Amino acid sequence: MTKIAVLGNGSWGSVLGSMLADNGNDVIFYGNIEAVNKEINEHHTNSHYMKDWHLNPTTSATGDLAKALQDAEIVLFVLPTSAVRIVAKQVKEVLDQSGNKPLLVTATKGIEPGSKKLISDILKEEIYPNDSDKIVAISGPSHAENVAQKDLTAIACASDNEENAKKVQKAFSNNYVRFYTNSDLVGVEVGGAIKNVIAIAAGILAGKGYGDDAKAALMTRGLAEISRLGVEYFGAQAKTFSGLSGIGDLIVTCTSVNSRNWRAGKQIGEGKSLDYVLKNMGQVVEGATTVKAVHELAEEKNIDMPINEAVYHVLYENADVDEEIARMMGRSPKAE
């Protein structure tokens, strides 16, 4: 039995934690909303995020970070990108006091605006500057709603250290979720982060009434942008983007109503404002934050990211969706 602390008890955190408990692990959630912690402990439910679903009854939740981290062998980050650095600093203080050095696993899919850092970079800076091989990222085509129903799912787990990736693979895998190890940590993270931006674009097209041809074109060219930024800026391996955390995650996020990024984009395509969508979504829309970081990177390094730029213009510069579509379709002809 492995002691696992899950930091973040939203939909994905709850489902992953419950799954890990189903696998025979000792799981405790850490969250800062006491009402959610109380509901998990007393009823084994998390109704705000996952209606009509029950967590494994052996799980528990706490608002005490030291209690959650005590003797943990794996610490799973399932927090919004904006909260990762804040919580990582707190984790560092607790671990320094205890002397414990657990594996850090990130299931957060985003890039930090301003610093333009991947989640693994933040964890290295704040917790493990000298033990970066103890960081693992998991990413792939996986919606919490589907995994909760034990739908068949495949996910990549990546680390600079193969043995640590295998440890996570063993702890997380079961008969309905299959984990594949991967050595390209940054590539897996880039794919998981930027596909959220493309999913917003896919939702916008759906909201405007465009069909399958437009969706396929967007996803294909979106994958080209993800690969371009991943390879040219982050030094990722190109082949990673043809795998689970690249095209796999892109497919599911751009085509499913379970995708909150797609749903957000659809509402924007239908004419709603970003402020309205974010206030009424009830969950974090990571693509709306990631698009800022990618915009900064594209400008800084002169990397061609037309889909990302169009989404950025619509979300943050009040650009007209139809004009952005016309501008993109009217770009100078080029080779694929």
Image (spheres, rainbow, N blue to C red):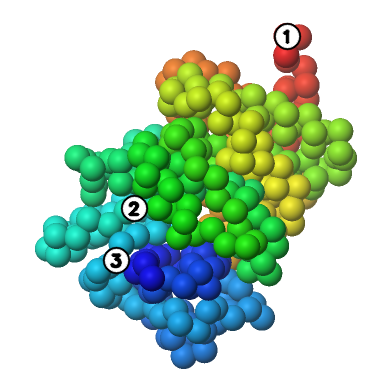
Alpha carbon distance from label 1 to label 2? 43 Å
Q: Is residue 145 visible?
A: no
Q: Identify the residue shown where x is 44% and y is 86%.
A: 41
Circles 1 and 2: CB atoms closer than 8 Å: no
Q: Which residue does the numbered mark 3 point to in the structure image?
A: 72
Give percent across and percent down for residue 91: 25, 59
State the image coordinates of residue 77 (x, y, percent, origin top left). 40, 57
Q: Residue at x 78, y 21 (%)?
A: 329
Could you tell whether 324 is left or right of 214 in the image? Answer: left
For label 2, the SS is strand
Mark number for residue 334? 1
Task: Name the kind of residue labelled 2 in the image.
Answer: Leu
**Residue 22, percent from left and from top:** 53, 73
Judge the density around disc 1: few (<14), some (14-19), many (≥20) Cα neighbours within 10 Å: few
Viewer-proximal residue among 274 and 31: 31
Q: Secondary structure at mark 1?
A: loop
Type of the residue with mark 3: Ala
- Look at the image and tell me whether residue 53 can be seen: yes
> Where 158 sits versus 97, above or below?
above
- Mark nearer the N terminus (1 vs 3): 3
Q: Position of residue 250 (x, y in %)?
A: 66, 41
Distance (Cα) linking label 2 and label 3: 10 Å
What is the number of the mark on residue 279? none
Q: Quadrant of the C terminus?
A: top right
Q: Which mark is drawn over residue 104?
A: 2
